[in-house]
Image (cartoon, rainbow, N blue to C red):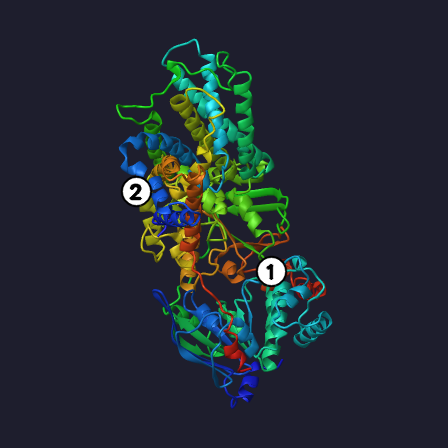
Amino acid sequence: MAGPNQVSGAREGAPARLQLSGVTKRFPGVLANDNVSVTVKPGEIHALLGENGAGKSTLVKMIYGILAPDSGQMFWDGEPVRIANPRAARKLGIGMVFQHFSLFEALTVLENIALGLDAKISQRDLEAEIHRVMELYGLKLDPARIVTTLSVGERQRIEIVRALLLNPRLLIMDEPTSVLTPQEVEQLFETLRKLAASGCSILYISHKLHEIVALCDTATILRGGKLVAECDPKQENPRSMAELMIGANLKTIARPAGREFGKERFSARALSLPKHGDFGVALDDIYISVRAGEILGVAGVAGNGQNELMEALSGELISVDADTIHLDGKRIGRFGPTARRAVGLCAVPEERNGHAAVADLTLLLNGALTARRRMGFVNIGLISEGKARIYAEKVIGAFGVKAQGANSTAGSLSGGNLQKFVVGREILQEPAVLIVSQPTWGVDAGAAATIRQSIVDLAGRGCAVIVVSSDLDELLEICDTLVVMNLGRLSRVLKVGEVSIEEIGLLMGGVHGDPSATKEMTEALVAHSI
Amino acid sequence: MLALSPVGAVLMTMIVGAIIFWAIGYDGPRAVEEMFFTPVLAPYKWPDVATKAAPLILIALGLTLGNRAKIWNIGAEGQYLLGAVGGAGVAMLTQDYTGWWIIPLMILVGILAGAFWAGIVAWLRNAFGVNEILSSLMLVYVALQLLNYLVSGPWKDPNGQNFPQTAPFTASQHLPAHAFGLPFPVGLYVAFGLALVFWLVMARSEYGLGVRIVGDAPKAARYAGYSQAHAVWSTLLVSGGMSGLAGVMEAMTQSGQLNLGFPSGYGFTAIIVSFLGRLHPVGIVLAGIVLAISYVGGQVAQTVVHVPSATAGIFQAMMLFFILASDVLVRRRIRIDWGGAAKTAGARS
């Protein structure tokens, strides 16, 4: 296919599509963007890289008119411009696809697109327009379908189509692949390459570095609000870019070779749960077995029952049958979360805010949230503040949590720091079994390495670990074995190192909502393997 | 900011109240003065204030637990009545006895009766998902009917000239209005003591932490092993018990019998006390005294400035309004968007 490099190269003489010059934005107490200059050429796929809190979102919000810069200038096609709000940005030709979709579940694709448009267009014209755009960029979507019935990948396509209908000349994509199967990612990249070849510039925000190597022409790297490097990803590798991002050498996860597993510590047997609510997923005959020292990964596209599985394993949903869950030979299916913790099962749910931690509470009390009984803070019904403080400070120290101290509220911490605290809180309880969901979701590379290393170390001390994640790279990096979750069911157990990405992708559901493509790929795979 | 907003709410109530009463033809500033300052400056009004503050504080302490968990008991008035009914029931049965055990027994049965009334609400919510706001409020009116029925029927005093009232309590069934040598009722000391207990429970206990999380972050509460159903049961039973305690002590101290004049509105006013006190035991003691002052001052203003009898209620409602409004405003910022910003870039494209 046509290389986007050639396209941008061919237009070297044209003025930059978007140029930021010395843009600065200050929030109370933080310099979010400090004198940042970025140039996006016509038809270029430009990566914006940085850790959490590096200032990517602030920069993008200024480009899309959500925030106004304190100083500095923006140029559009070489002319100075001030973008007052998103509507003005869209008028200029700037489109944005957000990480979190804003869709009405009960409406059709067409209705959702119509609702998001600034201009009024008749339904017939809109439908024709949608078909034209989908044809042009190879997007597959049925405008008549109700959003509820769509996969996450398809939902994202709605947002992309919505942005493309405005014939954007700059498309901003915020972490677009975090919810896609590998096959869907490849489809998305094809669309983006076609789009760039037609002259539209793309500003691509992601922390998945190998995707940036595969897709982008230029990368701008931010750290602490400052621009630290601009590079050609084709000349770099994921590791070198990660090191630019964190401004230090990246730690490699240290795992002893030739690890041996002990006997089974944790198992789920014939665990089924009916679905809760309209958007819940039923768990269907789940079997899981984890041995001492083993890290089992649960892969899958988000929303396929992972949350339900977490709740059933952690005890937030209690099973009807004690026999469905075993820990060190004890039958704990009927135990609630506190009783399961007492026998050694600790869990970290996916959502930090409001689930794993309470924003308004201090770290001291957030520590007591799950550690109060296991670590002996409670005496005749009262929580010992002294013991809870010592424990919270121990977690803060051991995991390098950046916080004022045990008295700062969880809400005052950045996402990565709070995640370190939450994971640290469970790990320092020395559980027999740790079940953790999305351990590094939205966490910067440095913090992610700390968290992954601590999980690997915990397994090294004989704990059985289950990691539920939609980040396949993470699972392949730290897990020994892998199961794939799709529509509330688990695949057979796969051994990391022996299984291919394609096979995992197919078990994840292949290309969602596109049975023919899935079938095609399955046949191709089967033909190869036999 | 949040700790100061009750003070602001009371000040705003005084200012706006003075203006409103002035606008409708009364001496507004004088009404406010009689209402809020006379009861404080005149020591002979203090026993009155204490008498009204005691049940307000007791009920509000109980309500606060539920309010923290966002489990809303609006029917404390009904539980308060049931407490008095329970105590009076014991009094009916022990008319012919004397002994130290009668008073504790009456109090215990009063607490249990209040808790039972709130327990119905908890059961309805947990078993059928019935909204506790509606069921607790409706049970107030059931309690009123029950009281009516009892005092006009089975419990009517045979020597009471056919008035709808029970026989007066005997000496063994009375609590002193002047306890420990001071002109304050026993209930006030009990309220102060229980405020300490509630402070300990809310600030330091495992249970208090759970109640707070159930309200703030229900998912985190479940994750931490605190069950919502348990919180519904416990907060409603405790607040029902506290309301029942207030009711039975009121009957044993003030009226000395049960009659149609017993309903007081304390159960509703205590909701204001709980929020004005910032859901904190110390704040509740202070807010309870402020609201008691407004009751006593309302009567003073009625006789001196001739404002209507509903005046105290109007001022109390304004306090609740301003405290809730200030909560909203302290946490948010008002920004007016004139909608003219689109022009800037629109001109370019």
**In the drawing, what numbered circle is on residue A504?**
1
Looking at this rendering, what residue extends furthest in the right direction? A124
Kindly indicate the quadrant of the structure image that contains residue B31: top left
| Residue B348 % position (x, y) | 53, 82
Residue type at mark 1?
Answer: Ile
Q: Which residue is mark 2?
A: A386
Q: Secondary structure at mark 1?
A: helix
Where is A78 relative to A157, above or below?
Answer: below
Is residue B26 found left or right of A386 in the rendered image?
right
**In the drawing, what numbered circle is on residue A428?**
none
- Subunit ID for the residue under disc 1: A
Mark 1 Cα within 10 Å, few/some/many (few <14, many 20+)? Answer: many
Is residue A274 found left or right of A88 in the rendered image?
right
Q: Secondary structure at mark 2?
A: helix
- Subunit ID for the residue under disc 2: A
Mark 2 Cα within 10 Å, few/some/many (few <14, many 20+)? Answer: few
Residue type at mark 2?
Answer: Gly
- The residue at the point 41 percent across, 25 percent down is B250
Where is B240 relative to A29, above or below?
Answer: above
User: Considering depth in this image, is B58 or A517 the residue closer to the camera?
Assistant: B58
